[in-house]
Structure formats: C-alpha cells, structure tokens
C-alpha cells in the first residue's frame, strides 16, 4: 500500500515539538484531506436540505447524498436500497431492535461492545454466550441455544477489545440452519478489510463512518431488502412518508422510511469521499497493511517481560488492534504517561466491553489500534516508551 501519511493533516501537528503517534483508530480514525475537502466543498458550494425542495442547490445536495449511498452500497456489495443512514453502529443496532418484528429470542456474546450487548442481552428470552480468552465463542452453548430456538444472533465481526476476527460465514450458516437471522456488528471490520455482505450471507450489518476516515455522526444499517420491507420506522417525522392525512399516513419504501428528519447531509457526503479514498487504496491492501502492523506489534510487545498480551497470538486471526496489560501498572496510568511523555495516544479501560473483562477476570487494559497511516516506526515508538515507563518505575 502507498504511504498515506501526507494525506492526514493532523499528523503534521506537533505537541511540545514531538510528532503525534496516533494509536487509537479503533475509537475513531483520523480524516484525510479528501474528506475534509468534500465536507468544505458541500458547505461552500452546495448547502441545502435533501429530498425536499426542487431548486438547484437542493437537487445538487440530493444527488451528492444519494451518490454517497451508492458508493457505500458498492463498497459492501449491497443494493443502494439496502443502505439506511443512521447516526452510527449503535443507532443501527437499536433500529433493528425496535423496528424488526418478532425478535423475542435473541442470542449475543460476552465479547460484544456495549452497543451490541445492551439492546439484546437483558431481555427475558435472551441468551448471552461466553467466549474464551481468545474471543472464541463457546460453540456448545451456542449450538444448544440455537436448538432451543433463536430469532436473531447478533455478534461482532472483529472484537474492539481482543481484536479477534470471527468466522462469519460459518457462524451465519449455523444460525440460518437453525432458522435465526444474523446481525453482524462490522464497526471494526468494514474499515480494515474487504467485506461482501452477499458472500457473508448476513441479514443485517452495522458500521460507522467515523472509524473509516469519514465524519462523525453518521453510520449505516445494511439490511436484506425483504427484511427492511418488513420493518417499521422507530422514529417518525419528515421524509419517511409518501402522503400524510389527518386520518393516516403512507410510509415510503426502504431505506427512506427509516430516515426521519433532516439527515447528517455533509457527514454522509464526507463518508462517500472516505469510501472512494479507501477504494482507491484497495481494501485488500488495507488488510495486508493491517496484518503486517498487528504481527509486528505482537512480535515486539511479546519480547517485553512486563507486558501480557490479550487475545489470539496468531495475527491472521486478528484485526486492527493489540490490547495488553503492563505488570504492576494500571491501564489509565500507562495511557496517560504515554500521552504526556511521548505523544503516543492509546485507549485504556474496558473499551466498552466491561462484561467481557469481568467474565474473563481481566483488569482494564491498554489498547493500541492501527490504521492505514500507521507504520512500524509508530510501534517502535510505543515499545520504546513502554520500556522507559517500566524502567522509570
Ligand atoms: C465493535 C463495535 N461495535 C459498536 C461500536 C459503536 O459504534 P458507534 O459508537 O460509532 O455507534 C463500536 C465503537 O467503538 C465498536 O467498536
């Protein structure tokens, strides 16, 4: 993959004369100039609402907005009518939870981000399957639950806490054979690898723009069109209707029936630019770059006796991040020292996966997460800074 660092203006920022080492892309990614320009161009030349007025600016804005939907659909091999814009992965999951009829018996796992656990895991007929230290599901428990009858299985493609990649096709085939639908939380996979919804076979998939170079405040729900047609909106308002009378109203077809009110127009357009940028790089190359960094980080960190790595040791079974404990040190303390002393920005804590940590008896951890603008030098800087912290104590 080509060197992309010059495309990211924030990487030029210096703090106390030092460069930034941004290792927190699993939380949110940096934005390339192409995305910043697309948002600025919209404000400068096209500002208008979408799907409403017939004037020139409104038609241009609508065209740009729907172009972004088409780009995104191509990116994941869906049809444009199967892409619903939401505020992010969290809202997409909640839209399915509230909009899809007949989801009483749900199954999720202890590995999930809170966004994919809270909507499902606390209902009377829900099952939460545990995972081992590598993030592998307890298959016996999963199969036993499927035998009892499950309406929907919700799980993440890539764990934001352990980095584990799940065998989605295999799990989806099992769920389908038992008559269950599948919702895939792809917040951490779509940014990092080629994802083809038709090939994976999932029924719903959720992901967020801000983790894949796009602006904040927008995400998408992919849903098979026949399922979206069975779903009702969970928010009512402008644009979702064909006609409104005092007695009743007629809903639009999907995806428009789910996009009540003025959407995040500029964010969607910026996301379209992000998708074009990633497509130009090539998602296979993005995945190869990610694998190289993860493998290198695992190898380098494993050399340090005071570091305990979490998750699978095989880089092929991981994506995007490496989480670890530093012997004798609390995770937030490590993250603060890395930031204050070396401008190395990592995440610390439970990574919105507290039940996972609790069920495995794990303390809060430090997470270094990577993206297209990271290099081996960033990982070397992290290791050097960690060595200094450990020695300093
Ligand atoms: C695996 C996973 N699922 C869901 C989410 C929630 O995404 P958002 O906050 O964009 O809704 C995240 C965010 O970190 C995540 O990592």
Image (cartoon, rainbow, N blue to C red):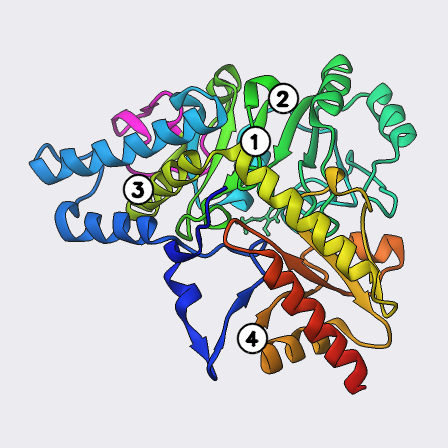
C-beta proximity under 8 Å, tags 4 and 2: no
Q: Pointer 1: residues within 10 angstroms few (<14), some, or many (20+)? A: many
Question: Camera-side residue: 247 or 123?
Answer: 123
For the residues marked 3 and 2, what is the alpha-carbon distance in whole angstroms? Answer: 27 Å
As helix, strand or loop, the secondary structure at mark 2 comes to helix
Position of 242 relative to 212 (above/below):
above
Q: CA distance from mark 3 to mark 1?
A: 20 Å
Question: Is there CB contact under 8 Å for labels 1 and 2?
Answer: yes
Is residue 252 visible in the rendered image? The answer is: yes
Instruction: Choose the circle earlier in sequence order: 3 or 2.
Output: 2
Q: Looking at the rendered structure, which numbered label has been put on residue 282?
A: none
Camera-side residue of 82 and 312 = 312
Q: Is residue 304 above or below residue 166?
A: below
In percent of width and height, residue 189 lies at 60, 39
Residue at numbered disc 3: 269
Which mark, by number, is residue 343? 4
Q: Are marks 3 and 2 in contact (CB under 8 Å)?
A: no
On residue 200, which mark appears? 2
Instruction: Give how far across and how far down residue 377 sits, in percent.
Output: 60, 62
The front one of 233 and 207 is 207
Mark 1 vs mark 4, foreground winner is 4
The residues tagged by marks 4 and 2 sit, at their Cα atoms, a distance apart of 39 Å
Residue density around tag 3, few if under 14, some if 14–19, many if 20 or more, within 10 Å = many
Residue holding disc 1: 205
Q: Position of residue 257 (x, y in %)?
A: 38, 28
Question: Quick one: label 1 or label 2, which is nearer the N terminus?
Answer: 2
* Residues in magenta, as a range: 233-257
- Dot 3 or dot 1, earlier in sequence: 1
State the quadrant of the C terminus.
bottom right
| Residue 200 location (% of width, % of height) | 63, 21
Marks 4, 2: nearer the viewer: 4
């Amino acid at each position: 993959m080509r060197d992309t660092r010059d495309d990211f203006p924030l990487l030029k920022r210096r703090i106390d004369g030092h460069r930034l080492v941004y290792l927190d892309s699993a939380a949110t990614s940096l934005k390339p100039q192409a995305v910043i320009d697309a948002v600025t161009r919209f404000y400068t030349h096209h500002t208008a609402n979408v799907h409403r007025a017939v004037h020139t600016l409104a038609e241009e804005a609508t065209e740009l907005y729907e172009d972004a939907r088409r780009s995104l659909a191509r990116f994941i091999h869906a049809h444009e009518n199967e892409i619903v814009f939401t505020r992010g992965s969290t809202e997409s999951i909640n839209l399915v939870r509230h909009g899809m009829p007949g989801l009483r018996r749900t199954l999720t796992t202890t590995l999930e981000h809170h966004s994919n656990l809270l909507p499902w895991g606390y209902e009377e007929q829900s099952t939460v399957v545990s995972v081992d230290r590598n993030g592998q599901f307890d298959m016996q428990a999963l199969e036993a639950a499927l035998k009892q009858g499950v309406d929907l299985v919700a799980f993440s493609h890539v764990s934001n806490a352990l980095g584990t990649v799940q065998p989605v096709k295999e799990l989806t085939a099992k769920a389908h054979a038992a008559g269950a639908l599948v919702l895939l939380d792809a917040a951490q996979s779509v940014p990092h690898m080629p994802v083809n919804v038709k090939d994976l076979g999932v029924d719903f998939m959720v992901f967020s723009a801000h983790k894949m170079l796009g602006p904040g405040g927008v995400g998408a729900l992919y849903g098979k069109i026949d399922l979206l047609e069975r779903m009702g909106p969970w928010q009512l308002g402008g644009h979702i209707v064909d006609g409104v009378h005092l007695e009743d109203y007629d809903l639009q077809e999907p995806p428009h029936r789910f996009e009540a009110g003025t959407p995040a127009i500029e964010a969607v357009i910026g996301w379209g630019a992000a998708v074009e940028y990633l497509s130009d790089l090539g998602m296979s190359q993005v995945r190869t770059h990610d694998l190289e960094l993860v493998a290198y980080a695992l190898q380098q960190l494993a050399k340090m006796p005071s570091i305990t790595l979490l998750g699978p040791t095989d880089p092929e079974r991981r994506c995007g991040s490496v989480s670890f404990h530093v012997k004798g040190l609390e995770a937030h303390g490590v993250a603060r020292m890395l930031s204050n002393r070396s401008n190395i920005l990592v995440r610390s804590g439970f990574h919105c996966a507290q039940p996972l940590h609790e069920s495995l008896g794990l303390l809060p951890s430090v997470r270094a997460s990577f993206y297209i603008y990271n290099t081996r030098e960033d990982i070397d800087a992290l290791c050097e800074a960690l060595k200094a912290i450990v020695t300093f104590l």
